[in-house]
Image: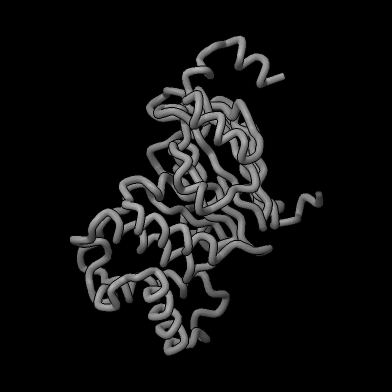
Amino acid sequence: MNKNDSTYLRIEGLKAGIDGREILRGVNLEISQGEVHALMGPNGSGKSTLANVLMGHPAYELYEGRVMLGDINVLELPVHERARIGLFLAFQYPVSITGVTVGKFLKRAVEARAENPEDMDVSSFFEKLEETMEFLEIDPRFVGRYLNNGFSGGEKKRMEIAQMLLLEPKFAILDETDSGLDIDALKVVSRGINRLRGPDFGSLIITHYQRILNYVKPDRVHVMYDGRIVASGREELVTKLEERGYEWLKDERVLENIRK
């Protein structure tokens, strides 16, 4: 692989934490555009920390390692530049922004990603926004509402996916996007993720459960435990986790065999 090849996102020896406490203890992972990876693991294993570090949450401290998109170490970039070069994070708990409407927020986000914002066709943007909201079964009146203000949990998660579809990132990190969703909302969100699948899109789906993976079939599955990725495989690994839970990972002999 050419080091300048930006079709790969490579996490190399990543160690990070918060308040001096190490949470990520040497994470190595490579995702290619055209692939969907799932990251599973018990609470406290470091999954959400990984998502936050990748996108530059200021509360987290980087101790060691790098994250390469082509020849760019994204950890050296401010948050808005990480988004501009093609990274996207769907939050586990999307925040509300009073005073900023959905329409204005999304328009500015798309403009920020564009190479020449002044050439952006506004009418085409709003046509695509309308079509995207219809596809995700979002009430079109939400365009004029403040972002996530008074939205239900499912509406917030659909709005995250709407942002992703409009921005068309190279790589999306979806941090427990399935949490709190009823089955109908889960199907809609999954449909949105699948809509972007193709050679120009890669994704890391962070989840506790199999259910979203029944609708978004992963190419690779990884298990995080105690700040490290301790197992990787195909869909069969998800079935094993559903059957046995995560307790079996607490056996150090099992972990040693996995790491070998």
Q: Tell whether 202 sits left or right of 92.
A: right
Q: Tell whether 196 sits left or right of 46.
A: right
Which residue appears at 75% of the width and 56% of the height? 5
In front here: 42 or 86?
A: 42
| Residue 177 image offset from top left, x and y in percent | 40, 50
| Residue 116 image offset from top left, x and y in percent | 55, 79
In front here: 119 or 44?
A: 44
Which residue appears at 41% of the width and 67% of the height? 162
In front here: 200 or 221?
A: 221
Q: Tell whether 249 sits left or right of 180.
A: right
Which residue appears at 56% of the width and 27% of the height? 228
| Residue 145 image offset from top left, x and y in percent | 22, 72
Q: Quadrant of residue 105?
A: bottom left
Q: Quadrant of residue 155?
A: bottom left
Q: Quadrant of residue 60?
A: top left
Question: How many numbered marks, from 0 up?
Answer: 0
Q: Quadrant of the C terminus?
A: top right
| Residue 213 image offset from top left, x and y in percent | 51, 47
Q: Residue furthest left?
A: 150
Q: Is residue 151 above or below residue 131?
A: above
In front here: 86 or 193?
A: 193
Q: What colour scheme governs how the chains and residues are painted in the rendered image of this protein?
A: one colour
Q: Tell whether 156 sits left or right of 35.
A: left
Q: Is residue 206 above or below residue 15?
A: below
